[in-house]
Image (cartoon, rainbow, N blue to C red):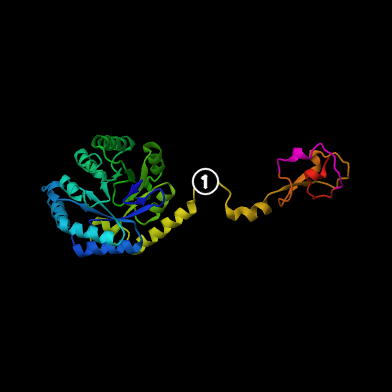
Amino acid sequence: MNIGGFDLTQKVLIVAEIGNNHEGDFATAKKLVREGAACGVGAVKFQVFRTKYFVTVADQARYERLSSFEMSHKQFEELHRLAKSHGLLFIATPLDLESAAFLERLVDAYKIASGDNNFFPLIERICRTGRPIILSSGLTDLQGIGKSKVFIEDRWRTFGVQQHLAVLHCVSSYPVSPEQANLGAIPTLIRELECTVGYSDHTLGIQACVIAVALGARIIEKHFTLDKNYSDFRDHRLSADPAEMAKLVRQIADVGVLLGSGEKVVQVAEAESAHRARRSIVAGADLPARHTVRLEDLTWIRPAVGLPPGEEARVVGKRLKRALAFGEPILPADVE
């Protein structure tokens, strides 16, 4: 899968999920983009919404708080330019149809939140754009996320647009306990959905993200904050701060090095060990010339300087041309 020129088959995409951790402060939003770039992430992500199309006004406290987090289209356009100036992909989660339409000319990919992975009118609007889609799988099971995947692919075919889909394993709890993280679902999603799979993390710390990469995740989305104690807004506590995000980037790079190509081949570093650790077929006793070699006349010792184990038939049953001392390799040239 490719997102904005980023090849996920070659490198894991690390997304700094800024979300609403700016809390409506534009200067903080810009600083989060710059800090994310300094950490080495590949993308930043925001949530874009109009509160009146997102939550009910009847929930007054939540409505007022989310309203205070809203930023204007002009501000998101500037954040997009800032991200691009730092070489970052710009990803966003629209939480209403109006925001989805606005983002079409800005995003490298749309992210569909777990709460909206069955909000089919929004998903259809996003599909019309032909942009890559990152679909979060929280709040549903394999059957449910499979239904959403089929819907997306059907709409893409109908609209005649490109098809680039990634599904993120996600547990929609804040924070997620280790017992509930269920990272073993990542290989299941890879096997059953046959598409790019990643991980949207809500655990404390970064260990789960590193493990997810080892299990096959090609996208890692981690909430990002300037300070875990920035405010009482819940997302800060489960977010990575700049020091932790930079550490995550380094550790994921290390995982890639450690995993290697995935092909089981003899490594260059093994060459010297192979000579010293492999065995040769040798005389198991002093053997006279003209002696007919029996299997019980043989033993196998290191290093590998003669015939390897498994080649005994090349000397057994044959007569020696010369006497051999105990431990001396028996070679085809030594027998008639």
One can see residue 237 in this view: yes
Image coords of residue 163 (percent x, y) = 30, 41
Position of 150 relative to 245 (above/below): above
Which residue in the structure is indicated by mark 1?
Answer: 263
**Quadrant of the snapshot with the N terminus:** top left
Q: Nearer the viewer, residue 193 or 4?
A: 4
| Residue drawn at (25%, 64%) of the image | 31
Residue type beneath disc 1? Glu
Q: Is residue 25 left or right of residue 141?
A: left
**Quarter occupied by residue 332:** top right
Tally the marks.
1
**Quadrant of the snapshot with the C terminus:** top right
Q: Nearer the viewer, residue 141 or 168?
A: 168
Image coords of residue 322 (percent x, y) = 87, 46
Q: Tag 1: Cα neighbours inside 10 Å, few (<14), some, or many (≥20)?
A: few
Q: Is residue 38 left or right of residue 27?
A: right
**Quarter occupied by residue 227:** bottom left
**Quarter occupied by residue 232:** bottom left
The range drawn in magenta is: 309-323
Image coords of residue 181 (percent x, y) = 36, 47
| Residue drawn at (24%, 49%) of the image | 93
SS category of the residue bearing label 1: loop
Verify whether residue 274 appears in magenta: no
One can see residue 22 in this view: no
Q: Nearer the viewer, residue 68 or 85?
A: 85
| Residue drawn at (80%, 45%) of the image | 333
Q: Is residue 30 left or right of residue 321?
A: left
Position of 136 relative to 237 (above/below): above
Image coords of residue 133 (percent x, y) = 28, 45
Verify whether residue 313 appears in magenta: yes
Dominant secondary structure (helix, strand or loop) of the stretch shown in magenta:
loop
